[in-house]
Every structure is written in C-alpha cells, then in structure tokens.
Amino acid sequence: MIISGGGGEDIDTDVDADVDADTNNELSFGQFLGWAGIGKAPLILLLATDLSLWGVFGWMLNVWFGSIINSKVNSLFGVTILFSSMIISLLMGGLIAQPIGKIFAEFGEDASSDRLIGCVGIVTSAYIPIGNQGRIGQVDVLDTKRNLLTVSAVIPDWATIAPQRGEKVLVIEHKAQIYLVIAKDSPDQEQWLANSSQIN
C-alpha cells in the first residue's frame, strides 16, 4: 500500500506487524487439538484415556452435585456436568499424553533395519548356522537406544566360526529379514575388518 511518495515502507511494516499480532492471538483448531493431546500420543491410547477420565469425572461430579442439592440431578445440571467433565478430561488427557508421547517417540525414532549394523548381540539359539544352509539362528541385540531386539541371524559363507548359545556376535549386514553376524573378537572379525578397510 502506497500512501505517499516517501515512507511507504514504514507504513507497510506497521500494517504487517498488526496483522501478525492479530493472527497469533487467535486459537486455531490445530492448537486446540494439540492442547487436547492429539498428535502427541497414539490416538487409541489418547481416546481410551480421555473417555475413561470423562466417565470418572462425570460420575464424581454427579455424586458431588447430588450430595450438595440432596436430590437427583436434573437435566440442566446434567448438561453442565457433561460438558464440564468433558473439558476436565480433555485437559487431563492432554497432560497425560505428553509423557506417553515421549515414551513412544523413543521407540519410533529409527525404524530402519540398518540401525543394528555394528551392534553387539548374544546368541539365544543353539548356534548360528551358515547362510546357505537354509536355517537361521536367533540373536538378542541392543540397539543404540538400548532397546533389546531379537533378530534372525546367519553367518556369512566365508566365516569359520559358528557362534554358540551365549556367545557374543557382531552384526555386520542386513539382508531381507535376516542379519549377517560374525563371532566377536574372533579371526572372522579380523578378516571382516581387514576386507572392509581394503574396500574403503
């Protein structure tokens, strides 16, 4: 907007600042959903929490109002109790959703299969077979977030040592639902490290 030949930029800046200030004070639907906890925790847990709290707070307010007026709650009080208990339950559900959301965020941060490569695991099956035998073993692996995962594993064809139950293994590769592992602190690990350094 140009009012005169000079000073148009100052007027334009003031108008933009006023418009921004007005839009920041409005409560949008997205802000309301965030206040109610939606998007901070899994929806099914949030719904279960909100509906359970709504029932409990509604019952508590019915009993409280009934004891104050010494009779059954009429429809006006019933509607008031319905909406007030809903608001209280949404507020409490939003507060409960914050720590639940943090817990689930840790599990969902890295869902890739490559996150286990380089991690150390312990053999839980009798032994880990060679990949070309058509059999698999199992390994418990701690990922970088300290989550314990049980994965299917085989050793590569060139490996000379088949790790037994309770022995430590190193995850070196992921191939279609199966991880390749080698015995930790073994000649196989030294060979794999030597081959990896030659490739790089």
Image (cartoon, rainbow, N blue to C red):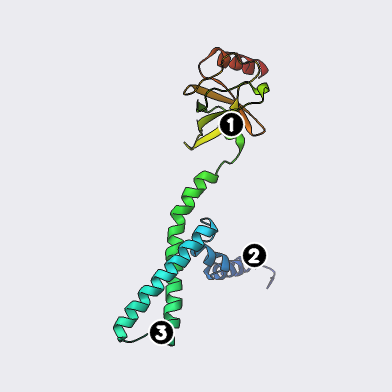
Q: Secondary structure at mark 3?
A: helix
Quadrant of the rendered image containing residue 200: top right
- Can you say whether 89 is above or below 108 in the image? below
Relative horizontal placement of residue 123, taking residue 156 as reference (left or right): left
Residue type for callout 3: Phe
> Disc 1, disc 3: CB below 8 Å?
no
> Percent x, y for residue 97?
46, 58
Q: Earlier in the sequence, mark 3 or mark 2?
A: 2
Residue at 51% x, 56% y is 40
Task: Tell which of 190 and 10 is nearer to you.
Answer: 190
Q: Nearer the viewer, mark 3 or mark 2?
A: 3
> Pointer 2: what residue?
9
For label 3, count other residues whose C-alpha is less than 10 Å away and answer few (under 14), some (14-19) or many (20+): some
Q: Which residue is mark 3?
A: 77
Q: CA distance from mark 1 to mark 3?
A: 60 Å
Front residue (pair 74, 32): 74
Residue highlighted by disc 1? 152
How much space separates mark 1 and mark 2, taking CA atoms?
Answer: 66 Å
Q: Which amino acid, by three-letter code, is at mark 2?
A: Glu
Q: Nearer the viewer, mark 1 or mark 2?
A: 1
The structure residue drawn at horizontal position 52% and vertical position 67%, both measured from the top left corner, is: 32
Whole-percent x, y for residue 132 in the image = 68, 22
In the rendered image, the vertical position of residue 194 relative to residue 165, given as above or below: above
Residue 173, visible in the rendered structure: yes
Q: How many marks?
A: 3
Name the quadrant of the N terminus.
bottom right
Which comes sooner in the sequence, label 1 or label 2?
Answer: 2
N-terminal label among 1 and 3: 3
